[in-house]
Image (cartoon, rainbow, N blue to C red):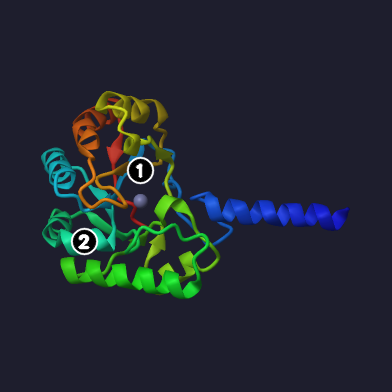
Amino acid sequence: MIAAAISTLVVAAVAHGAFHRNSPIFGRVLGRLPTRDRMIALTFDDGPNPIATPRILETLRAENVPATFFLVGRHVERWPAIARQIAADGHAIGNHTYSHHKLHFSSPSFVRMDLTRSTGAITAAIGKRPRYFRAPHGYRNPWVSHIARQLGQITIGWTLGVWDTDRPGADVIARRVRSGVRPGTILLLHDGDGYDATGDRTQTADALPRILSDLRNSGYEFVGLAT
Ligand SMILES: [Zn+2]
Protein backbone atom coordinates (compact mmCIF):
# COMPACT_ATOMS: atom_id res chain seq x y z
CA MET A 1 0.00 0.00 0.00
CA ILE A 2 2.67 2.46 1.11
CA ALA A 3 4.99 1.20 -1.61
CA ALA A 4 2.25 1.74 -4.20
CA ALA A 5 1.63 5.25 -2.91
CA ILE A 6 5.35 6.03 -3.00
CA SER A 7 5.72 4.69 -6.51
CA THR A 8 2.74 6.78 -7.61
CA LEU A 9 4.44 9.82 -6.12
CA VAL A 10 7.70 8.97 -7.87
CA VAL A 11 5.93 8.55 -11.21
CA ALA A 12 4.13 11.87 -10.69
CA ALA A 13 7.37 13.62 -9.76
CA VAL A 14 9.21 12.22 -12.78
CA ALA A 15 6.35 13.23 -15.08
CA HIS A 16 6.36 16.72 -13.59
CA GLY A 17 10.12 16.94 -14.03
CA ALA A 18 9.95 15.76 -17.64
CA PHE A 19 6.99 17.73 -18.90
CA HIS A 20 6.72 20.87 -16.77
CA ARG A 21 9.04 23.49 -18.19
CA ASN A 22 9.66 25.21 -14.83
CA SER A 23 9.91 22.11 -12.64
CA PRO A 24 13.00 22.09 -10.39
CA ILE A 25 13.00 18.28 -10.18
CA PHE A 26 15.52 17.84 -13.01
CA GLY A 27 17.63 20.90 -12.17
CA ARG A 28 17.05 24.57 -11.47
CA VAL A 29 15.08 26.55 -14.04
CA LEU A 30 14.27 30.23 -14.17
CA GLY A 31 10.52 30.25 -14.88
CA ARG A 32 9.77 33.86 -13.96
CA LEU A 33 11.66 37.00 -13.02
CA PRO A 34 12.26 37.42 -9.28
CA THR A 35 10.30 40.68 -8.99
CA ARG A 36 6.87 42.00 -8.06
CA ASP A 37 7.39 45.09 -10.19
CA ARG A 38 5.90 45.47 -13.62
CA MET A 39 8.82 43.98 -15.47
CA ILE A 40 8.66 41.57 -18.36
CA ALA A 41 11.30 39.64 -20.30
CA LEU A 42 10.56 38.89 -23.95
CA THR A 43 11.88 35.63 -25.37
CA PHE A 44 11.69 34.33 -28.93
CA ASP A 45 12.19 30.67 -29.79
CA ASP A 46 12.97 28.54 -32.84
CA GLY A 47 14.72 31.08 -35.08
CA PRO A 48 16.48 32.40 -36.94
CA ASN A 49 13.78 32.70 -39.60
CA PRO A 50 14.35 34.58 -42.88
CA ILE A 51 11.06 36.55 -42.79
CA ALA A 52 9.92 36.97 -39.19
CA THR A 53 13.24 37.47 -37.39
CA PRO A 54 14.37 40.59 -39.34
CA ARG A 55 10.90 42.14 -38.90
CA ILE A 56 10.90 41.41 -35.16
CA LEU A 57 14.42 42.86 -34.85
CA GLU A 58 13.27 46.01 -36.61
CA THR A 59 10.37 46.48 -34.19
CA LEU A 60 12.57 45.86 -31.14
CA ARG A 61 15.18 48.30 -32.48
CA ALA A 62 12.60 51.01 -33.14
CA GLU A 63 11.16 50.61 -29.63
CA ASN A 64 14.53 50.09 -27.94
CA VAL A 65 13.36 46.85 -26.31
CA PRO A 66 15.75 44.03 -25.28
CA ALA A 67 14.90 40.36 -25.81
CA THR A 68 16.44 36.90 -25.61
CA PHE A 69 16.46 34.65 -28.67
CA PHE A 70 16.67 30.87 -28.24
CA LEU A 71 18.18 29.69 -31.50
CA VAL A 72 17.95 26.29 -33.17
CA GLY A 73 21.46 25.27 -34.29
CA ARG A 74 20.26 23.79 -37.57
CA HIS A 75 18.53 27.08 -38.47
CA VAL A 76 21.61 29.08 -37.42
CA GLU A 77 23.69 27.12 -39.95
CA ARG A 78 21.15 28.03 -42.64
CA TRP A 79 20.74 31.70 -41.66
CA PRO A 80 23.99 32.73 -39.90
CA ALA A 81 23.75 36.39 -40.94
CA ILE A 82 20.39 36.73 -39.17
CA ALA A 83 21.83 35.14 -36.02
CA ARG A 84 24.70 37.65 -36.23
CA GLN A 85 22.22 40.53 -36.54
CA ILE A 86 20.35 39.40 -33.41
CA ALA A 87 23.61 39.51 -31.44
CA ALA A 88 24.74 42.77 -33.09
CA ASP A 89 21.48 44.39 -31.97
CA GLY A 90 22.47 43.59 -28.38
CA HIS A 91 19.94 40.84 -27.65
CA ALA A 92 20.86 37.88 -25.48
CA ILE A 93 21.29 34.51 -27.14
CA GLY A 94 20.17 31.13 -25.89
CA ASN A 95 20.74 27.60 -27.12
CA HIS A 96 17.53 25.81 -28.15
CA THR A 97 19.28 22.59 -29.30
CA TYR A 98 20.54 21.66 -32.76
CA SER A 99 17.67 19.48 -33.97
CA HIS A 100 14.71 20.66 -31.81
CA HIS A 101 14.31 17.03 -30.78
CA LYS A 102 12.14 16.51 -27.65
CA LEU A 103 14.73 15.51 -25.05
CA HIS A 104 12.77 13.77 -22.26
CA PHE A 105 13.52 10.26 -23.60
CA SER A 106 16.96 11.11 -25.01
CA SER A 107 20.15 9.47 -23.74
CA PRO A 108 22.90 11.53 -22.09
CA SER A 109 25.11 10.99 -25.15
CA PHE A 110 22.43 12.27 -27.53
CA VAL A 111 21.72 15.31 -25.35
CA ARG A 112 25.43 16.12 -25.03
CA MET A 113 26.00 15.69 -28.77
CA ASP A 114 22.97 17.81 -29.75
CA LEU A 115 23.59 20.65 -27.27
CA THR A 116 27.31 20.74 -28.06
CA ARG A 117 26.59 20.85 -31.79
CA SER A 118 24.17 23.79 -31.45
CA THR A 119 26.54 25.60 -29.10
CA GLY A 120 29.22 25.24 -31.80
CA ALA A 121 26.89 26.46 -34.57
CA ILE A 122 25.80 29.50 -32.55
CA THR A 123 29.34 30.35 -31.44
CA ALA A 124 30.63 30.07 -35.02
CA ALA A 125 27.89 32.41 -36.28
CA ILE A 126 27.93 35.13 -33.62
CA GLY A 127 31.45 34.89 -32.22
CA LYS A 128 30.43 34.19 -28.64
CA ARG A 129 28.89 31.36 -26.69
CA PRO A 130 25.19 31.32 -25.77
CA ARG A 131 24.51 32.11 -22.09
CA TYR A 132 21.12 30.45 -21.79
CA PHE A 133 19.44 27.18 -22.67
CA ARG A 134 15.78 26.33 -23.20
CA ALA A 135 14.60 22.78 -23.89
CA PRO A 136 12.28 22.18 -26.88
CA HIS A 137 8.70 22.20 -25.52
CA GLY A 138 10.28 22.52 -22.05
CA TYR A 139 10.75 18.72 -21.92
CA ARG A 140 13.76 17.56 -19.94
CA ASN A 141 15.19 14.57 -18.07
CA PRO A 142 17.74 14.37 -15.22
CA TRP A 143 20.76 15.16 -17.42
CA VAL A 144 19.50 17.88 -19.78
CA SER A 145 20.03 20.94 -17.54
CA HIS A 146 23.16 19.37 -16.07
CA ILE A 147 24.72 19.10 -19.53
CA ALA A 148 23.57 22.64 -20.43
CA ARG A 149 25.24 23.92 -17.26
CA GLN A 150 28.48 22.14 -18.18
CA LEU A 151 28.30 24.08 -21.46
CA GLY A 152 27.96 27.31 -19.43
CA GLN A 153 24.22 27.75 -20.06
CA ILE A 154 21.50 28.55 -17.52
CA THR A 155 18.19 26.75 -18.13
CA ILE A 156 15.24 29.08 -18.72
CA GLY A 157 11.55 28.16 -18.69
CA TRP A 158 8.70 30.59 -19.26
CA THR A 159 5.75 32.09 -17.41
CA LEU A 160 3.36 32.77 -20.26
CA GLY A 161 3.00 31.15 -23.67
CA VAL A 162 0.26 32.38 -26.00
CA TRP A 163 0.25 29.58 -28.62
CA ASP A 164 1.35 31.95 -31.37
CA THR A 165 2.62 28.85 -33.25
CA ASP A 166 -1.05 27.92 -33.89
CA ARG A 167 -1.32 31.16 -35.89
CA PRO A 168 -4.63 32.33 -34.40
CA GLY A 169 -4.21 35.83 -35.88
CA ALA A 170 -2.13 38.79 -34.69
CA ASP A 171 -5.10 40.28 -32.77
CA VAL A 172 -5.59 37.10 -30.75
CA ILE A 173 -1.86 36.79 -30.01
CA ALA A 174 -1.75 40.38 -28.72
CA ARG A 175 -4.93 39.88 -26.68
CA ARG A 176 -3.61 36.70 -25.04
CA VAL A 177 -0.46 38.55 -23.96
CA ARG A 178 -2.51 41.47 -22.62
CA SER A 179 -4.76 39.24 -20.54
CA GLY A 180 -2.08 36.80 -19.35
CA VAL A 181 0.78 39.07 -18.36
CA ARG A 182 1.75 39.53 -14.69
CA PRO A 183 4.70 41.27 -13.01
CA GLY A 184 7.84 39.19 -13.59
CA THR A 185 6.52 37.34 -16.65
CA ILE A 186 8.96 35.62 -18.96
CA LEU A 187 6.95 35.73 -22.19
CA LEU A 188 7.41 33.00 -24.80
CA LEU A 189 6.92 34.01 -28.43
CA HIS A 190 8.21 32.40 -31.63
CA ASP A 191 10.19 34.07 -34.41
CA GLY A 192 10.77 30.67 -36.02
CA ASP A 193 9.49 27.12 -36.39
CA GLY A 194 11.47 24.42 -34.58
CA TYR A 195 11.15 22.00 -37.46
CA ASP A 196 10.72 24.09 -40.63
CA ALA A 197 13.52 26.63 -41.19
CA THR A 198 11.18 28.72 -43.36
CA GLY A 199 8.00 28.23 -41.26
CA ASP A 200 5.52 31.11 -41.20
CA ARG A 201 5.77 33.30 -38.08
CA THR A 202 4.56 36.54 -39.65
CA GLN A 203 1.58 36.71 -37.27
CA THR A 204 3.95 37.00 -34.31
CA ALA A 205 5.90 39.71 -36.14
CA ASP A 206 2.60 41.48 -36.92
CA ALA A 207 1.45 41.26 -33.29
CA LEU A 208 4.67 42.57 -31.73
CA PRO A 209 4.15 46.35 -32.15
CA ARG A 210 0.75 46.02 -30.45
CA ILE A 211 2.15 43.79 -27.71
CA LEU A 212 4.84 46.37 -26.93
CA SER A 213 2.44 49.33 -26.89
CA ASP A 214 -0.14 47.44 -24.77
CA LEU A 215 2.51 46.51 -22.21
CA ARG A 216 3.98 50.01 -22.12
CA ASN A 217 0.49 51.45 -21.63
CA SER A 218 0.05 49.08 -18.67
CA GLY A 219 3.27 50.39 -17.13
CA TYR A 220 5.55 47.45 -17.98
CA GLU A 221 9.30 47.79 -18.36
CA PHE A 222 11.16 45.42 -20.70
CA VAL A 223 14.19 43.77 -19.16
CA GLY A 224 16.66 40.99 -19.96
CA LEU A 225 16.83 37.70 -18.07
CA ALA A 226 19.98 38.92 -16.27
CA THR A 227 20.70 35.86 -14.19
ZN1 LIG B 1 11.07 25.42 -29.67
Which residue occupies 40% across, 54% down? Answer: 136
Which residue occupies 36% across, 28% down? Answer: 176
- Residue 222 percent across, percent down from the top left: 27, 41
Q: Is mark 2 within 8 Å of ligand 1?
A: no
* Kind of residue at badge 2: Val
- Nearest the viewer among 38 and 72 is 72
Determine which quarter of the picture holds residue 84: bottom left
Q: Is mark 1 within 8 Å of ligand 1?
A: no
* Kind of residue at badge 1: Leu
Residue 84 got which mark? none
* Residue 75 appears left or right of 175: left
- Quarter that holds the C terminus: bottom left
Whole-angstrom CA distance, mark 1 to mark 2, is 19 Å
Residue 201 in sight here: yes
Determine which quarter of the picture holds residue 203: top left
Sequence-wise, the earlier of marks 1 and 2 is 2
Above or below: residue 4 compared with residue 208: below
Residue 76 got which mark? 2
- Residue 209 percent across, percent down from the top left: 19, 31
- Residue 133 percent across, percent down from the top left: 37, 60
Residue reaching furthest right? 1
* Residue 73 appears left or right of 140: left
Residue 152 in sight here: no
Mark 2: which secondary structure? helix
- Nearest the viewer among 48 and 150 is 48
Above or below: residue 7 compared with residue 41: below
Residue 188 got which mark? 1
Q: Residues within 10 Å of mark 2 (few under 14, many from 20)?
A: many
Dot in front, 1 or 2: 2
Which residue occupies 68% across, 55% down? Answer: 11
Mark 1: which secondary structure? strand
